[in-house]
Image (cartoon, rainbow, N blue to C red):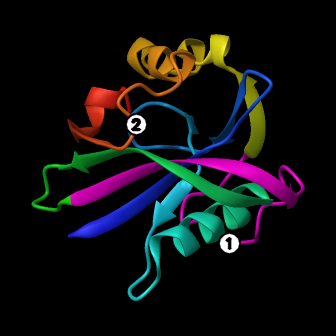
Amino acid sequence: MKVRVTGVVIEDGRILLLDQDTGDGRSWSLPGGKVEPGEPIGDALVRELREETGLDVRPGRLLYVCDHLPGDGAHVIHLTFEAARIGGDVGAVAEGADTTPIRGVRFVPLTGLTALGFSPRFVQLARDGWPGAGSYMGAKANIGL
């Protein structure tokens, strides 16, 4: 079983995204990645966001816990957290930070998410302030990811 963390950074009605192939048809995604063996979850979130976006963040509330079963027998626990920027520069991506190249990092208006391949469900959760935050949501698709 693997554990992944994802950070949701929203400022002025805009959400922080990566331009990166996701393997599911979208080229924009939330920043995050795998928790390394022996690494605390909060440290993994801070590390992944710094590497992938250039931002220093403070982990916030746990939004959702989901399962991702990619069909190859793997089981990934997906933890989505709010995060707040405390420093850094958007786009200062660490060289080789990810196995999938990151083409860009930017804040995107919530109103533009569906045009980038995000589901209406995810957009609605964001607009509504993440109802049910802290809940186990089952499949990742249940939060529109």
Q: Which residue is mark 2?
A: 133
Q: Quadrant of residue 88?
A: bottom right
The residue at 9%/60% (across/down) is 73
In magenta stretch: residue 11: no
Q: Residue at x 42, y 18 (%)?
A: 119
C-alpha distance separating marks 2 and 1: 33 Å
19 displayed left or right of 91: left
Q: Answer left or right for 131 relative to 87.
A: left
Query: Residue lying furthest bottom in this view?
Result: 38
Q: Is tag 2's residue or tag 1's residue first in the polypeptide sequence? A: 1
Q: Which residue is mark 1?
A: 96
Residue 111 sits above or below residue 91 on the image: above
Looking at the rendered structure, the kind of residue marked 1 is: Gly
Q: Position of residue 63 (x, y in %)?
A: 43, 42
Residue 61 or residue 32, whichever sits in front = 61
Give the residues drawn in magenta, as a range: 76-103
Asked whether residue 90 is drawn in magenta, I would say yes
Kindly report which numbered mark, 2 or 1, lies closer to the viewer in this rendering. Answer: 2
Q: Quadrant of the N terminus?
A: bottom left
* Residue closer to the observer: 113 or 43: 43
Mark 2 residue type: Ala
Residue 7 screen position, x and y as percent = 57, 49
Please state, as top left, top right, bottom left or bottom right, where the C terminus lies in the image.
top left
- Using a 10 Å C-alpha cutoff, classify the residue at mark 1 as few (fewer than 14 neighbours), some (14 to 19) or many (20 or more): few
x, y percent for residue 113: 59, 19
Q: Secondary structure at mark 2?
A: loop
Dot 2, crowdedness within 10 Å: few (<14), some or many (≥20)? some
* SS under mark 1: loop
